[in-house]
Amino acid sequence: MKAVKITVTGKVQGVFYRASARDAAERLHVTGFAQNQPDGSVYLEAEGEEEDVNSFIAWCEAGPPRAKVSNVVVEDTGIKKFQRFEIRR
């Protein structure tokens, strides 16, 4: 198992980034959450099999079609045993 914290900056709010991240996570069997931040970034936590989490990170670097990702910062974190991937407000 692998667990990461991801911060994505750029044009990532108002472009369905969180909903698209949830769809990608479900497709990749990754659990966690996505949450908009006051500074305009999106913060995500993701956990699952290492290969699936790595694929999710790669998805985050591109994002959905309307996003313009400028930077992605990934840090390892502890396993929290999320039951699903959710959008947090």
Image (cartoon, helix red, strand yellow):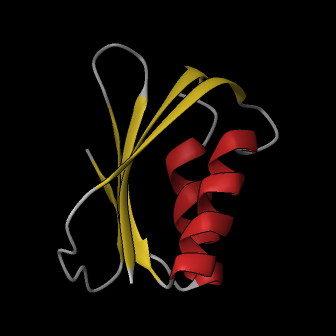
Q: Quadrant of residue 21?
A: bottom right
Residue 5 position within the rendered picture, expressed as x and y whole percent measured from the top left? 34, 49
Give the camera-side residue of 29 and 40: 29
Residue at 50%, 49% (x, y): give it. 18
Q: Residue 39 at what x, y percent from top left?
A: 34, 13
Residue farthest to the top?
Answer: 39
Number of on-image labels: 0
From the viewer's side, name the closer residue of 27 and 80: 80
Q: Relative to 77, is 52 above or below? A: below
The spot of residue 58 in percent (x, y) is 70, 54
| Residue at the limit of the structure toward the right, as seen here | 65
Q: Give above or below for 10 relative to 59.
A: above
**Residue 20 percent across, percent down from the top left:** 62, 56
- Measuring 68% from the left and 41% from the top, which residue is drawn there? 61
Judge by depth and name the residue closer to the eye, 8 or 18.
8
Q: Is residue 51 above or below residue 32?
A: below
Q: Residue at x 54, y 70 (%)?
A: 53
Q: Quadrant of the C terminus?
A: top left
- Residue at 60% in and 78% down: 52
Query: Where, by quadrant of the figure, is residue 43 drawn?
Result: top left
Tell me if residue 88 comes above or below residue 31 in the rendering. above
In the image, taking residue 47 as reference, residue 83 lies left or right, namely left
Quarter of the image with the N terminus is bottom left
